[in-house]
Amino acid sequence: MAHRALRTLAAGIVLALAGGVLAGCSSGGPAEVRFHLSKPEAIPYFRDLIREYNDSQDDVEVVFDTSSNLQAGFLRGNPPDLGLLNYNMEMARFMERGALSDLGDMPEAERIRPDVQELVDQYATYPGRTSVLPYSVMAASVIYNVDIFEQHGLEVPTTWEELLAVCDTLQAAGVTPFYGTFKEPWSIGQGWFDYSVGGMVDVAAFVEEINELGTEIGPDSEVSFQQTLKEPAERMMQLAEYANPDAPSRGYGDGNLAFANGEAAMYLQGPWALGEIAKTDDQLKLGTFPLPMTDNPDDLKVRVNIDLAAWIPESSQQKEGAREFLSYIMQQEVMDEYNAEFLGFGTTTDAAPATDERILAMQPYYDDGRFYQGVTKAVPLTIPIDNLLQGLITGGSVDSTLSRLDQEWARLALRQ
Amino acid sequence: MTQTQPAAAAREANAIDPERPGGVPSKRRRRVGAERVNWPGTIILFLCALTVLVPLYVTIAMSFKTTGQAVDGNAFALPAPFSVDGFVQAWQLTDFPVAFTVSTLITVVTVAGTVILAAAASFAITRNWDRRLFRWSFFYLLAAMFLPFPVVALPQIQLTGLAGLDNPAGVALLHIMFQLSFSILLFTAFLRSIPDELEESARIDGATTWQTFWQLIFPLLAPMSATVGIFAFLASWNDFMMPSLIISDPAMQTLPVVQDMFQTQFSNNYNVSFASYLMAMAPAIIVYLFTQRWVMEGVTQGAVKG
């Protein structure tokens, strides 16, 4: 009896294997476009959008992909047909090697603001191609508790001196000026360091120059971490003194909770934290302002990153279908709706302005192109810059940390 | 036949101890055990149990909290208000039934394939140990134990892509392959303790090699098959990296991989993620509850006879 059962089981396994192989070969019907999205919060939003689109026409059937591995897909030769994800240095490697097709001839490409498109080019370019279309930009600056500021009769500071005055007033009144979450290395890089550097230094130019310098970077080169970024880093350390004393043991989750409970007046985080804070208190009045680092209010800038960028791989079999769906999601109403819901800023010339009052104050800076991409994002992941900065902010020395960065930069340049 | 059959011997040994207090030495040991509690040991084991029970409690409590309560910093608090919203969201976000079915299919194929293939291979190897081909093939298969998947990940991705195996079937196949070496090690150790005479008597009765294996040897291997099966089950059910790299169709992805979306740098959805983890953990815990007796038996038997 056991004999027969086992034989049936064996046959079942063989059938299952064969079935799996054959399932991959089916064809016919509408063109199947695989759409990859990396932002978990936006999954329900795009799921509805895809359903709407699939119902509206019969040529293209969009399949939603939130889990597949991009590297494996490109390696195997079947990457998703359309990608919409956070744009960073890792993604730029694909474009640098020509794995992404040219979208420059799409009418949508014309609508992208040139200074926003330039953000993409700051990572890498491929000659003669517009491979990546920015879909949404996140602008980040200091988040502040409006009620606390009003209680103490404080104005939003626009210069370094005013900022210090605000901090001193708050501290004298027994309010923690900044909430620091130094346990989490990325929060130091993203907020404390990037804001400090971005407020004083032309980040794009700095990155371009250190890339050109390569192995030549060092104490005697024209620009370097230890020379150019010394002053911002020192000012960052000065501000860190105003942070909560237990900052080194606080993580991102703790910070959101504490800030939502009004335990500090300012929080150096991006708009992603606003949603997390709202989980605890969705009535809290919050605002944002760029961190003033100099005595000139004209130097104020906000930190931006490309929250979502669209691309179509060169090796996709369904480029046409993917383009059609891309045009669909790049209709202005769709983009505006997305940005309104996820606190993003539009990337097109005709984008609707932000409406959420928590990020409203950043709109003028964004419109004028007064923004920069975080300097930590220009450093390849091989160099653990966030961890080095964590060492700095929890008591390290500015000079040794920055010269270490120079050495790491030169070493990496030598290897490449 | 002076030697006793191992399985029967084990059963006898089990029977003497707890069931039959007639044996003199056994009785004395029992009384000693009953009178004195081993306090240091109990405390250590209690602490060990806590390391499992506390996270489990947090998992269960979290999964029934609302999103607001989940981030309030009190992980140990009881859910108030009690909410199943996490389960609903997790179910929808991961497309739970599909991912669960795919995971289950891969696991079932892996367990069955590993047990059958490893048992058959071990049988062939141990009974032909004097032949160089079999001996070397044993070493060859064993060598695979020292080859972790990440090392061969890139070629595997390309090969499965070329062979049309970039789907759950390919993952099951690779799971079987990676599970094979360790399983064969366990089976051969166990098989060596089964006397040849048993097999010879079957042959005298006219059994073919195939019949000897299926009707005599394979049933005798049952305790070890349980061990091998459980190892294969855990490895396959919990695997993240291989399915995430090999399966190209997102709709056919396994549970651990689709759950990855809950972990991001910027947002914490503890209630949703823990609800999802709980649903994914349940089968492994349930399977273990029902089979732990065999696991323990299998492990100790393998250890003694090896």
Image (cartoon, coloured by chain):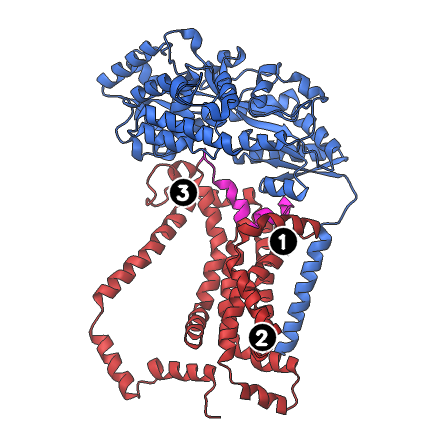
The residue singled out by tag 2 in the image is B125
Is the same chain shared between marks 2 and 1? yes
Relative to B199, residue B288 above or below: above
Task: Please name the predominant secondary structure of the magenta segment in the image.
Answer: helix
The residue singled out by tag 3 in the image is B65
| Cα gap from disc 1 to disc 3, whole angstroms | 34 Å
Q: Amino acid at mark 1?
A: Pro
Q: Earlier in the sequence, mark 1 or mark 3?
A: 3
Q: Which color was chain B given?
A: red
Q: Amino acid at mark 3?
A: Lys
Compare residues B29 and A284 and report the one nearer the observer.
Answer: B29
Give the structural element (helix, strand or loop) at label 1: helix
Neighbourhood count class around disc 2 (C-alpha, 10 Å): few under 14, some 14–19, many 20 upward: many
**Numbered disc in front, either 2 or 1:** 2
Q: Which color was chain A given?
A: blue
Q: Is residue A411 visible?
A: yes
Going by the image, does A334 lie left or right of A60? left
The magenta-colored residue range is B242-267
